[in-house]
Image (cartoon, helix red, strand yellow):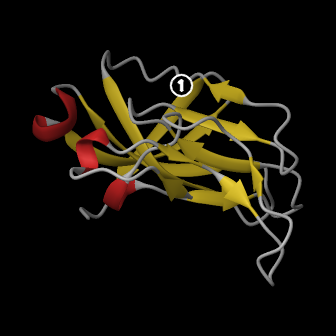
Protein backbone atom coordinates (compact mmCIF):
# COMPACT_ATOMS: atom_id res chain seq x y z
CA UNK A 1 0.00 0.00 0.00
CA UNK A 2 1.10 3.53 -0.65
CA UNK A 3 -0.28 6.79 0.71
CA UNK A 4 -0.36 10.36 -0.48
CA UNK A 5 1.63 12.74 1.71
CA UNK A 6 -0.23 14.20 4.65
CA UNK A 7 0.52 15.62 8.06
CA UNK A 8 -2.11 13.41 9.73
CA UNK A 9 -3.03 9.76 9.25
CA UNK A 10 -6.73 10.75 9.37
CA UNK A 11 -6.34 12.67 6.10
CA UNK A 12 -4.03 10.22 4.31
CA UNK A 13 -5.40 8.64 1.17
CA UNK A 14 -4.09 5.14 0.56
CA UNK A 15 -4.18 2.93 -2.52
CA UNK A 16 -3.24 -0.74 -2.98
CA UNK A 17 -0.39 -1.53 -5.39
CA UNK A 18 1.44 -4.63 -6.66
CA UNK A 19 4.96 -4.81 -8.08
CA UNK A 20 7.57 -7.37 -9.02
CA UNK A 21 10.02 -8.37 -6.29
CA UNK A 22 12.68 -6.11 -7.89
CA UNK A 23 10.32 -3.09 -7.79
CA UNK A 24 9.49 -3.08 -11.50
CA UNK A 25 5.99 -3.41 -12.92
CA UNK A 26 4.32 -1.16 -10.32
CA UNK A 27 0.53 -1.33 -10.80
CA UNK A 28 -2.07 0.60 -8.80
CA UNK A 29 -5.05 -1.68 -8.03
CA UNK A 30 -7.39 0.73 -6.23
CA UNK A 31 -8.00 4.46 -6.34
CA UNK A 32 -6.44 6.61 -3.62
CA UNK A 33 -8.84 6.87 -0.67
CA UNK A 34 -10.37 3.40 -1.05
CA UNK A 35 -7.96 1.44 1.17
CA UNK A 36 -7.54 1.99 4.90
CA UNK A 37 -4.51 3.92 6.13
CA UNK A 38 -2.38 3.65 9.27
CA UNK A 39 -2.11 0.81 11.83
CA UNK A 40 -5.19 -1.16 10.80
CA UNK A 41 -4.26 -1.24 7.12
CA UNK A 42 -3.59 -4.55 5.42
CA UNK A 43 -3.87 -6.16 2.01
CA UNK A 44 -3.51 -9.93 1.70
CA UNK A 45 -3.28 -12.38 -1.20
CA UNK A 46 -5.66 -15.33 -1.46
CA UNK A 47 -3.89 -18.72 -1.25
CA UNK A 48 -4.40 -19.28 -5.00
CA UNK A 49 -3.00 -15.82 -5.82
CA UNK A 50 -6.12 -14.78 -7.75
CA UNK A 51 -7.52 -12.19 -5.32
CA UNK A 52 -6.39 -9.60 -2.79
CA UNK A 53 -8.50 -8.65 0.24
CA UNK A 54 -8.36 -5.32 2.07
CA UNK A 55 -10.56 -2.86 3.98
CA UNK A 56 -11.81 0.69 3.41
CA UNK A 57 -11.44 3.63 5.82
CA UNK A 58 -15.15 3.09 6.62
CA UNK A 59 -14.52 -0.45 7.87
CA UNK A 60 -15.91 -2.29 4.86
CA UNK A 61 -14.07 -5.20 3.22
CA UNK A 62 -13.36 -5.62 -0.49
CA UNK A 63 -11.51 -7.90 -2.90
CA UNK A 64 -9.66 -7.02 -6.10
CA UNK A 65 -7.77 -9.07 -8.69
CA UNK A 66 -3.97 -8.55 -8.93
CA UNK A 67 -4.44 -6.88 -12.33
CA UNK A 68 -6.76 -4.24 -10.83
CA UNK A 69 -10.01 -5.70 -12.20
CA UNK A 70 -12.91 -7.17 -10.27
CA UNK A 71 -13.03 -4.64 -7.43
CA UNK A 72 -15.89 -6.07 -5.33
CA UNK A 73 -17.24 -5.10 -1.90
CA UNK A 74 -17.90 -7.92 0.57
CA UNK A 75 -21.31 -7.26 2.16
CA UNK A 76 -21.38 -8.55 5.74
CA UNK A 77 -24.71 -9.56 7.23
CA UNK A 78 -23.78 -9.25 10.88
CA UNK A 79 -27.22 -8.58 12.34
CA UNK A 80 -25.58 -6.13 14.75
CA UNK A 81 -26.21 -2.78 13.10
CA UNK A 82 -23.15 -0.54 12.66
CA UNK A 83 -19.81 -2.29 12.33
CA UNK A 84 -16.18 -1.58 11.44
CA UNK A 85 -14.22 -4.51 9.94
CA UNK A 86 -10.42 -4.51 9.64
CA UNK A 87 -7.29 -6.63 9.07
CA UNK A 88 -8.87 -9.29 6.81
CA UNK A 89 -6.99 -12.49 5.93
CA UNK A 90 -7.81 -15.63 3.94
CA UNK A 91 -8.17 -19.10 5.41
CA UNK A 92 -5.39 -21.48 4.28
CA UNK A 93 -7.73 -23.18 1.77
CA UNK A 94 -9.12 -19.85 0.51
CA UNK A 95 -12.76 -20.72 1.22
CA UNK A 96 -13.26 -18.28 4.12
CA UNK A 97 -11.93 -14.99 5.43
CA UNK A 98 -11.09 -13.98 8.96
CA UNK A 99 -11.08 -10.40 10.20
CA UNK A 100 -11.65 -8.35 13.33
CA UNK A 101 -14.59 -6.03 13.80
CA UNK A 102 -15.86 -3.39 16.17
CA UNK A 103 -19.61 -3.79 16.63
CA UNK A 104 -22.48 -2.08 18.46
CA UNK A 105 -21.20 1.30 19.43
CA UNK A 106 -18.80 2.32 16.74
CA UNK A 107 -15.07 2.29 16.29
CA UNK A 108 -13.90 3.52 19.69
CA UNK A 109 -16.59 2.11 21.95
CA UNK A 110 -17.37 -1.19 20.26
CA UNK A 111 -16.19 -4.71 20.92
CA UNK A 112 -13.49 -6.32 18.84
CA UNK A 113 -14.46 -9.73 17.45
CA UNK A 114 -12.99 -12.29 15.07
CA UNK A 115 -15.60 -13.30 12.50
CA UNK A 116 -15.83 -16.16 10.01
CA UNK A 117 -18.46 -15.57 7.33
CA UNK A 118 -20.46 -18.74 6.73
CA UNK A 119 -23.04 -18.27 4.03
CA UNK A 120 -25.42 -15.52 5.05
CA UNK A 121 -24.39 -15.23 8.71
CA UNK A 122 -21.26 -14.51 10.69
CA UNK A 123 -19.79 -16.87 13.33
CA UNK A 124 -18.57 -14.85 16.29
CA UNK A 125 -15.38 -15.68 18.27
CA UNK A 126 -13.25 -13.54 20.64
CA UNK A 127 -10.59 -11.42 18.98
CA UNK A 128 -7.41 -10.37 20.75
CA UNK A 129 -7.19 -6.57 20.95
CA UNK A 130 -4.54 -4.84 18.87
* Picture quadrant where residue 38 is located: bottom left
Q: Residue 18: where, in percent of width, then height?
A: 75, 61
| Residue at image location 10% in from the left, 36% down from the top | 109
Which quadrant does the C terminus fall into?
bottom left
Front residue (pair 96, 62) = 62
- Which residue is nearer to you in this view: 122 or 22? 22
Left or right: residue 109 versus residue 34 is left
Q: Residue at (81%, 84%) from the top-left corner?
A: 22
Please count the marks in the image.
1
Give the quadrant of residue 41: bottom left
Quadrant in which the N terminus is drawn: bottom right
Residue 116 falls in image quadrant: top right
Note whether 19 is above or below 74 in the view shown: below
Residue displayed at 64% across by 26% down: 73
Determine whether 9 is above or below 92 in the image. above
- From this viewpoint, which residue is outermost toward the left? 109
| Rendered location of residue 50, percent (x, y) | 89, 52
User: Is residue 96 in view?
Assistant: no
For disc 1, the neighbor class at 10 Å (few under 14, some 14 to 19, many from 20) is: some
Give SS at disc 1.
loop
Mark 1 sits on what residue?
76
In the picture as drawn, the residue positioned furthest to the bottom comes out as 22
Expressed as whole percent of the image width and height from the top left, the position of residue 63 reads 70, 39
- Vertically, is 80 above or below 111? above
Q: Position of residue 32 (x, y in %)?
A: 54, 38
Q: Is residue 32 visible in the rendered structure shown here?
A: yes
Q: Nearer the viewer, residue 70 or 105?
A: 70
Amino acid sequence: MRSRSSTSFQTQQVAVFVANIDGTGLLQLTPFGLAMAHDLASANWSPDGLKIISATPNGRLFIVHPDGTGLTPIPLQTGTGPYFAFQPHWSPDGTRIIFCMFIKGGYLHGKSRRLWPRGSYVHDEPCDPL
